[in-house]
Amino acid sequence: MKIQQTEVVIIGAGFSGIAAAKKLHEAKIPFLILEARERIGGRVFTKHLSENLYVDLGGQWIGPTQDRMYALCQELNIPYFETYDQGKNILKLRGKIRTYQGIIPKMDPLSLINLDIVMRRLERMAKQIEIQSPWTHPKAGKWDGMTLEDFLKKYSKTKSCYEVIKIGCETIFACELSEISLLHALFYIRSGTSLDCLINIKNGAQQHRIEGGMQRIIEEMAKPFYDKIIFESPVERVIQGADSISVDFGDRSIEAQEAIIAIPPPLLNQIQFEPELSKEKQELLQNYPMGRVGKCFMIYEKPFWRTLEYSGQVVSDDPLTHQTVFDCSPADGRFGILMGFVIGNRAEEYFCLSEEERKNRMMRSLKQYFGEKAETAIQYLDFTMSDEAWSKGCYAGLMPVNSWSKFQDNYRKSEDRLHFAGTEAAMRWHGYIEGAVLAGEAAASKIIKNQPN
């Protein structure tokens, strides 16, 4: 077996692993990065269709209070631009299509009042959560013992209110609302600043996109140490000895003093640890599913909906199509791109269809919203991280009922020489690229702090 030696080995070359590497590189600490794929980026994946045409198949937005992402854009001289947010939005609810302006859809007065009450209640509860330790709230046990769906059904007094808030939450969390505890939802909202921030484009988490695609940032981050990345090298075994760590992959091994593990939670179960991970971490990993989301893109020669005074944004309760649609055209509008999210059970059903059936289903729904010009697409493509062997899903791992109460911060806790990163280890902007960067930097900081003077 070929053995290499270094100070730190990083498992995973997504944003978290590369952020950790960048910090170690700046501190002049030697490292090597192992990446199972043939590319960096992890759950961020920009696909270039031609010289001037690209789509972000993974994470794509940044917004206010994501300070590290904006700092990286400035440091790396990467421009960003406003997500298109002008004109009429569309709501399809129980077969009826309505248009509206702003963030709140047009519904009957009782449903609008109910929706505002439910959203404000969630906001008030989330503000009470301590993001470093959400399990310490006096009502943590009660909130962790019920699902987000239980909560919304209890407080939604009209069907329209429930359907609209359900779609919004599915888009935020990338799952069925029965899959996460209310406490996890409240923590997630608090972690991402506020519910308004997570939902909104303007002054929200979807405010800006990166010119050239999100992967441009991580490519620039990794340039100074790209030769330290070993691609197509899934890790099989991690052995902690008294003085060092051995990480085995294929017929090769890396010996290091410490390791940073920056991969999605389900992938930890595919690695043999000697000695085993703590009982608590193993038990958590037995029921730590990933979100389920697909991104579907319909590409046009121009964003024709803009001339019709539509924003391109759609919210729909139709189980046969996308929960939400956004205008994802490039900054200069030289192409028009509509991107639809299919989430949770809808995503699973959708991706059981053939690609042609998926394309036709999206085109039929877009024609309902934007008229016959929706049939003039020049290309369709879609993608789900659930089909990716080295992601298992997106956006992030989900904490089911009673998980926070039982396991607390066990996922992000270091175990001797092993340090855990990834967006799931983040307390701030958990589930987002910002969180991945912060968690990677935090893991690297632990190692830097332990260095002898």
Image (cartoon, helix red, strand yellow):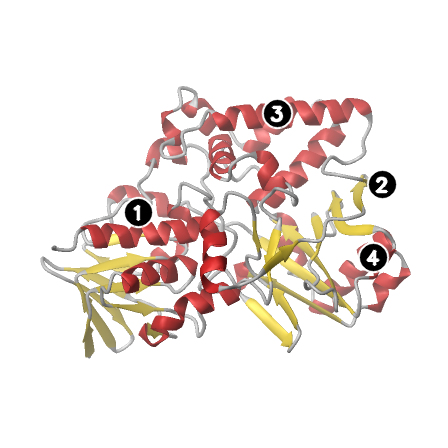
Label 4 and label 1: CA atoms lie apart by 50 Å
Q: Amino acid at mark 4?
A: Trp
Residues at circles 3 and 4 in contact by the CB criterion of under 8 Å: no
4 or 2: mark nearer the eye: 4
Would residue 266 be visible to someone looking at this image? Answer: yes
- The residue lying toward the viewer, choosing from 118 and 389, is 118
For discs 3 and 2, the disc positioned in front in the rendered view: 3
- Secondary structure of the residue carrying tag 4 is helix
Instruction: Tell which tag, 3 or 1, sits nearer the viewer.
Output: 3
**Which residue has dot 1 on it?**
282
Residue denoted by label 3: 120
Q: Earlier in the sequence, mark 2 or mark 1?
A: 2
Q: Image height check: is 162 above or below 303?
A: above
Give the number of the disc on residue 111: none
Residue 383 is drawn in which quadrant? bottom right
Tag 2: residue type? Arg
| Quarter of the view holding residue 150 | top right
- Percent across and percent down for residue 75 are 45, 60
Image quadrant holding the N terminus, namely bottom left
Q: Circle 1 sits in a helix, a strand or a loop, which is it? A: helix
Measure the alpha-carbon separation of dots 4 and 2.
16 Å
Q: CA distance from mark 3 to mark 4?
A: 33 Å
Q: Which residue is mark 2?
A: 98
Residue receiving disc 4: 305
At 36% from the left edge and 35% from the top edge, which residue is drawn? 132
Counting residues from the N terminus, which is met first, the one under dot 4 or under dot 1?
A: 1
| Residue 233 can be seen in this image | no
Crowd band around label 1 with a 10 angstrom C-alpha radius: few (<14), some (14–19), many (20+): some
